Image (spheres, rainbow, N blue to C red):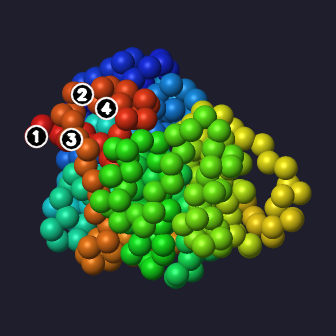
Amino acid sequence: MRAFQVVEHGAPSSLQVSEIADLKPSADQILIGVRAAGINFPDVLVVSGKYQILPKRPFTPGKDLAGVVLKTGRNVTRFAAGDRVLCHVEHGAFAEQALVTADQTFKLPNGLSFQHAAAMGLVYQTAYLALIDRGGFQKGETVLIGGAAGGIGLAAIHLAKGLGGRVLAAVRNEDEAAFVKANGADHVIDISGSDIRDSLRAQVQAATNGHGADVVLDPLGGDFLGAALRAMAWCGRLVVIGFAAGDIPSVKVNYLLLKNISISGLQWSDYRDRTPSRVHEVQTDIFRLWEEGFVKPQLMKEYPFEELPAALDLISEGRVRGKAVIVMSS
């Protein structure tokens, strides 16, 4: 089979397609024939060697895949050959075959394509757990979403609207503004200026009649976090998801005390490894929201398998609206 492999860490162009032996499942594993794989910002970090979890090289990167069960180990009882599935893995998705466990695997609803399923993996899980488990979101609350036109941001818009929230979507240009409005955002927050410290708060206050944001989801870091803190409601909750803007900000904690606000963080893989039952609950609810029409993965582009490096370049440059996926040729 073919697999992209990290031999030496570097730019996406350093990835190599290798011909390796077909995989064989152990007693507790499932062999998947990969049909599509989602592309996420952490994949760029993994390839470059900057991610917090890095397996021994050479290895196959990729965290989201959708495909068909080819074979199961003797201890696997919940899946059988022919099942259409979505899988969340630490690495291994950018290949024609992948080995997974039952806890990492979810049967697809009828009518959900492999491409759209692959776009519903890490970003929707991250957005859901950030919104509900870490952000304590309640129906009727206002959610401010940083990087709202990206994968996690768009997922958060869909989920917050589906769960009864009001969405303020932070974007950088008119194209992103039109995109998030088309996907259900109630109000657009412009963060394109060089100093958003005051402008972000003014926009949020105007959009909420002075109330502020009850929940903030921050995959950006940088200047956004500090500006968002100033725009939060009393007892608001901010969830740190990542640092796509590049800089890791610091916080003066006296501000948390003065407004009774809180900051928490989310690393989704910990939930996958520590509480797989919760991940299954979340995925079930995400599928429910898809069936009800709230979750609508937006595929900016479907890349042939061979063009993975180009797709990773696009996401590293922040030029993906929604999601990009790679699709196997056979």
- Tell me the distance, in whole angstroms, between the alpha carbons under discs 2 and 4: 7 Å
304 vs 83: above or below:
above
Task: Kindly identify the residue that appears in the image at 45 percent across and 79 percent down.
Answer: 164
User: Quadrant of residue 234 in the image?
Assistant: bottom right
User: Quadrant of residue 76 in the image?
Assistant: bottom left
Mark earlier in primary sequence (2, 1): 2
Residue 33: percent from left, percent from top: 21, 48
- Tell me the distance, in whole angstroms, between the alpha carbons under discs 3 and 1: 14 Å
Say which residue label 2 marks. 307
Are dots 2 and 4 in contact, CB under 8 Å?
yes
Residue 200: percent from left, percent from top: 61, 52
275 vs 94: above or below:
below
Residue 11 appears in view: yes
Is the residue marked by circle 3 packed among few (<14), some (14-19), or many (20+) residues within 10 Å? some
Say which residue label 1 marks. 330
Task: Kindly identify the residue that appears in the image at 36 percent across and 18 percent down.
Answer: 13
- Tell me the distance, in whole angstroms, between the alpha carbons under discs 4 and 3: 9 Å
- Image check: 72 left or right of 232? left
- Disc 1 or disc 4, which is closer to the eye? 4
- Disc 2 or disc 1, which is closer to the eye? 2
Q: Amino acid at mark 3?
A: Glu
Disc assigned to residue 302: 3
Q: Amino acid at mark 2?
A: Glu
- Image check: 129 left or right of 312? right
Say which residue label 4 marks. 311
Mark earlier in primary sequence (3, 2): 3
Residue 46: percent from left, percent from top: 50, 33
Mark earlier in primary sequence (4, 3): 3
Are dots 4 and 3 in contact, CB under 8 Å?
no
Q: Amino acid at mark 1?
A: Ser
Quadrant (top left/top right/bottom left/bottom right) for the N terminus: top left
Q: Secondary structure at mark 3?
A: strand
